[in-house]
Amino acid sequence: MSLPSLTVRVSAIRSQSPQGRGGAIFTGIEVDERGMRQDAKAHLVVKAPHWLLTTAVEVGQLWIITGKVEASTIVVNGYRLTESTLTPEAMELLRPSGEHIVTLLAECDAFAGIGMVKARRLWGHFGHDLYAILDNGDVKRLEEVMTTDAAATLADAWHRWGDTFTLQWLQAKGFPLALGRKVIAYFSPHPAIQIERDPYRLISFAADWATTDRLARDTFGIAENDPRRLVGAVEEALYGAFDAGHTCATRSEVVQRVGRLLGSDHIVDRALSEAEAKGCFLRRAGRLHAVGPYVMERGIAESIAQRAVQPDPLLNRSELAAALTGYQAESGVTLEASQSDALAVANANPIGVITGGAGTGKTTVLRAFFRICAEAGWPVCAMALSGRAARRISEATGHPATTIAGFLASVNAGTLPPRAVVVIDEASMLDLPAAYRLIRHLPETYRFVLVGDPHQLPPVGPGLLLHELAHHDGIPRVELQQVKRYGGKIAEAATAIRRGQWPDLPEDPQAEMAFLPCALNDINDVVLDLLADDPQNVQILCATRTAAAGGVKAINALCAAALHAANEELLRWNAEFEIVQGTGFRVGSPVICLINDWKMNLQNGSLGVIVSVEPPDRDAQPGQRLGVIRWDDGQQRDLTPDLLPHLELAYAITIHKAQGSQFPRIIVPVRHARLLDRTLLYTAITRAQQQVILVGDVAAARNAVEAPPHASLRQVALGALLTEILEGMA
């Protein structure tokens, strides 16, 4: 049986975004098509989930709500009222009609300052023409009834109100809410008109091809061979390659992809011709480049080349020698030959690349280099892509560091010194867009030192920076060779895997480096048994988040049930459903922070353990303490409602999250997966200080190590562009 649909006018908001998870709880009255109240004694309590709302709920709005109504009776000031709770299955915000607009303008917060008197005056003066006047933003006509400022404010508010209906329309066509908001913000003030002119523009906002093509053809009647459709398919093919990590693609690859998108091969050549004529891509060296990625790679190559051909020492030879002698005497550290070479390169050149495997002393080099910069009078801007990696630099060197995003924010604020040395640690994680924003937009007076390991994981985003520069003859670079952090079997296995050779590993859980083979369905249980032996010193590192066997979520759920199910749970009061609700976190639960919170000195990737929880509070405020977490920097901090949505269990974390960190012992579940390659395994095992245990499919691990790493399959043009530019400068 179908559920009833009611037209409800919002009369009061009880809770907007309860628990910080979106949604709303509001009261309203049922009205008819004329806006008249259906029952003077009845009002509705609507508990709207976030996935049904296209905008914030405001007083005066009209909604058509489909859902189940459950009645209850309450007494207010001696009067008996019927309160009905409505749980929506579907919701649609209505554009007001007739005199509904009077109530909307008078009561809705979006039109604050109008009030009932002005609303009645507007309706009385313009009647039904008021809709067209507001839609057109006709301030002059509105001034017939109100002041210029009030008219402009009303026109702007109505424009923003109208965007809600475009958003609702896009959502009904299958586009996610977040994407719809981006589209409206970009195409304002007339998003619907802009979309109708060329629906394939939505591809630029990460809309999927199937949904966009269906909208264009079914709603707007665009033909199979319409130039807009043909160009859109080529752009989708090129940017699809970009999303997969490539900055360019061969013509045959693009042809194949475009043919699949269009569902026909006979119009592919025409599609390429139309797209090229429109300037959607460039042809270079047998590859097609989307304009955006090409501009970024070219810009980076030019900036790096300018620095590479102009040596400019910070200190002269005698000053450098004295600085290094002083550093070694004060620190008690003896620099080995490749470390001294790395410091000489960084000192001599405005661009330098220092690479080396895990534990080869890159941090020692940074500490010495910061000493050189201080003696030369150059400020240092140390940074990394992730907050956790930035904190590690700061802790290891004693020099302040930030994320690249934080640094770029200071660039925009205009607070940078006129010259500086930019040091980027864990530079293998740096993708093309981040590198472009950083390198291209700083003045020529800024020097760069990139530090990292190109054999670790490539960037999550497109492009390759460190990997290309580390092997380019035109770039001043040094590779550190001597492993200092660990040795023995872990170092031997890491070196072999880095070279693409599978090491011979024992099946002994007590060994320093071991592989315990087991069936796919047994991986989680074996991992749990190993963790239970020493949970305080073990970190589980997984290739994937969602796999049922060997994935982060499944292992976290299993470990939580086995190790801490009897401990006190963190409970919250859920105002939306008026019940106490579990969070999945208990005393003793390890957690990971998923955001950078500089006020609390927490970074994306910070790890901690919940040490206490508070009883649930119906009226918990944003900063109220829900419990206490002891973090991996040794500090205890309050667990607040603001922080809670950004925490996850961390018995297991992804290998990507662990990059740049170290743990006493690690356990790595291994199974066949798309992400599994030698760089993933190499990154995982080099996180360990004392022991590594791999668990699962030996054949999958061997095949991954012996196959070319995924990064080598990325098609990028940075190296070739750099060679071309440097040759032109010679």
Image (cartoon, grey):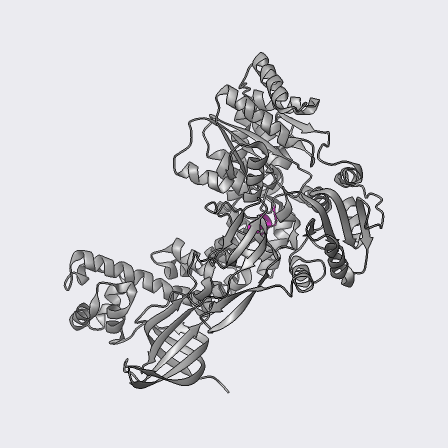
Q: Is residue 506 above or below residue 17?
A: above
Q: Is residue 150 magenta?
A: no
Q: Is residue 310 above or below residue 462?
A: above
The part of the image, by quadrant, that contains residue 94 is bottom left
Percent position (x, y) of residue 154? 24, 61
The part of the image, by quadrant, that contains residue 257 is bottom right
Q: Is residue 10 above or below residue 590?
A: below
Residue depicted at 62% across the width and 35% down the height:
466
Left or right: 361, with 281 as reference point:
right
Residue depicted at 14% across the width and 63% down the height:
144
Q: Is residue 362 above or below residue 522?
A: above
Percent position (x, y) of residue 648? 58, 57
Percent position (x, y) of residue 561? 67, 65
Q: Nearer the viewer, residue 139 or 110?
A: 110
The part of the image, by quadrant, that contains residue 333 is top right
Residue depicted at 46% across the width and 84% down the height:
3
Which quarter of the image is occupied by the C terminus?
Answer: top right
Q: Residue most toward the top?
A: 318
Q: Is residue 240 magenta?
A: yes
What stretch of residues is rendered in magenta?
A: 239-245
Percent position (x, y) of residue 76? 31, 81
Q: Main secondary structure of the magenta part?
A: helix
Q: Nearer the viewer, residue 680 or 243?
A: 680
Residue 342 shows in this picture: yes
